[in-house]
Image: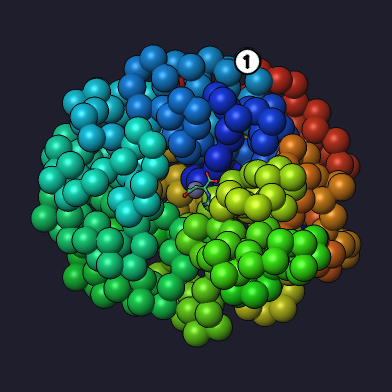
């Protein structure tokens, strides 16, 4: 039996408010506990997005009623809300900026709109950026110019991890996270759709069915570069982005994979394979996220794992509402058997024991 601290996932799409057919605060936090994760930081791209005091209250009210593990909620950077979100910083997980993808009200069309956020958001919390490739380089330049912490979400490319390494060597305040799917999967690894002929022309239209995810699954060279630079990776985050199977198998599949329940078993299997150490898991899922996001200690909180339990990942056994996993049928070694959260048994032998509302907002600890 292996004992781990309660793990922290800084990148989770809870989908509430607005898209509770995909997930909500209840099912997301059940999935977290089943995966050995006792604290989640929730992304702001809900419906409506979380970008001011009233939308933040909307998300936090649902969380207060339904969460079964601890949490904090991000606010999103929009074109006109730099003062507002900066004033909410003590109540938020951090500020999320979508820098190169268009995203409804959180759209930042040009770099002049980044400036007030970098000037005003309090420096004891990071700005988390969704920025790929060259826009990631621009975000790192902003971190240098404004001398403030920037956390790069879901790094997937060789060019990205190498640039982050170089920036860190020069003392720029940049940290980063990598997701399990960018370390264990490559382009072409997730079957396109239930049957390859179900949607003829899907590839020509630039769609890849269930495999749709942002950032896209990358090449062998990219995956190798990430594994070779584990020391540059500060955090393992799931980017748990649940969409239902019906949506994923539709003609216009939304991007995103669920990940809360599969991350730890995959990391533990990599430990058995000699690709990772238990210390790597602890530093990237507990020590570093706690430091980067300025998170409190969860007293009397730990996770027990049966390191030798072998089993197959099956969507049917998951707590997430989305009903699928890109790792279906994968054989893993390492099962979460028990989770104790703030002195209470929150998960044991496949059952979630903490009730709705037991989860606490860590910014109100
Ligand atoms: C995210 C989602 O579904 O919310 N999807 C994803 O593929 N990561 C959207 C996003 O973060 O861009
Ligand atoms: Zn995301």
Crowding around mark 1 (Cα neighbors within 10 Å: few <14, some 14 to 19, many 20+) is: some
* 294 in relation to 282, above or below: above
Image coordinates of residue 236 in percent, x first then y, are 53, 58
Image coordinates of residue 124 in percent, x first then y, are 27, 39
Residue at horizontal 66 percent and vertical 60 percent from the top: 209
Residue 318 sits in quarter: top right
Q: Nearer the viewer, residue 202 or 88?
A: 202
Residue at horizontal 76 percent and vertical 50 percent from the top: 324
Q: In which quarter of the image is the N terminus?
A: bottom right
Q: Nearer the viewer, residue 15 or 338?
A: 15
Residue 34 sits in quarter: top right
Report whether 217 appears left or right of 87: right
Q: Which of 20 and 75 is in front in this view?
A: 20
* 238 in relation to 294, above or below: below
Instruction: Report the number of numbered marks.
Output: 1
Image coordinates of residue 202 in percent, x first then y, are 63, 64
Residue 71 sits in quarter: top right
Report whether 81 appears left or right of 144: right
Residue with the most extreme front position:
200
Disc 1 target residue? 65
Q: How is the image coloured?
A: rainbow
Image coordinates of residue 253 in percent, x first then y, are 62, 52
């Amino acid at each position: 039996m292996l004992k781990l601290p309660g793990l922290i996932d800084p990148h989770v799409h809870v989908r509430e408010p607005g898209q509770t057919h995909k997930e909500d605060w209840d099912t997301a936090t059940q999935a977290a506990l089943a995966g050995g994760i006792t604290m989640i930081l929730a992304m702001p791209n809900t419906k409506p997005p979380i970008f001011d005091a009233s939308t933040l209250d909307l998300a936090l009210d649902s969380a207060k009623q339904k969460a079964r593990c601890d949490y904090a909620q991000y606010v999103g950077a929009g074109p006109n809300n730099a003062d507002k979100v900066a004033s909410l910083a003590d109540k938020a997980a951090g500020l999320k900026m979508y820098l190169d993808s268009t995203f409804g009200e959180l759209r930042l069309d040009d770099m002049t709109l980044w400036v007030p956020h970098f000037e005003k958001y309090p420096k004891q919390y990071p700005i988390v950026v969704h920025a790929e490739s060259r826009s990631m380089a621009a975000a790192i330049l902003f971190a240098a110019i404004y001398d403030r912490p920037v956390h790069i979400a879901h790094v997937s490319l060789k060019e990205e991890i190498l640039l982050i390494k170089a920036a860190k060597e020069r003392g720029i305040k940049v940290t980063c996270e990598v997701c399990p799917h960018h370390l264990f999967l490559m382009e072409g690894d997730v079957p396109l759709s239930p049957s390859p002929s179900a949607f003829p022309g899907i590839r020509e239209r630039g769609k890849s069915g269930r495999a749709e995810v942002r950032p896209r699954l990358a090449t062998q060279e990219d995956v190798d570069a990430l594994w070779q630079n584990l020391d540059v990776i500060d955090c393992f985050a799931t980017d748990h982005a649940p969409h239902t199977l019906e949506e994923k198998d539709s003609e216009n599949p939304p991007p995103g994979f669920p990940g809360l329940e599969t991350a730890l078993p995959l990391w533990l299997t990599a430990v058995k394979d000699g690709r990772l150490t238990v210390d790597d898991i602890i530093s990237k899922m507990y020590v570093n996220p706690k430091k980067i996001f300025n998170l409190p200690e969860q007293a009397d909180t730990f996770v027990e794992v049966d390191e030798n339990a072998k089993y197959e990942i099956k969507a049917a056994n998951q707590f997430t509402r989305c009903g699928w996993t890109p790792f279906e049928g994968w054989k893993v070694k390492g099962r979460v058997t028990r989770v104790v959260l703030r002195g209470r048994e929150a998960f044991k032998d496949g059952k979630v024991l903490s009730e709705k509302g037991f989860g606490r907002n860590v910014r109100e600890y």
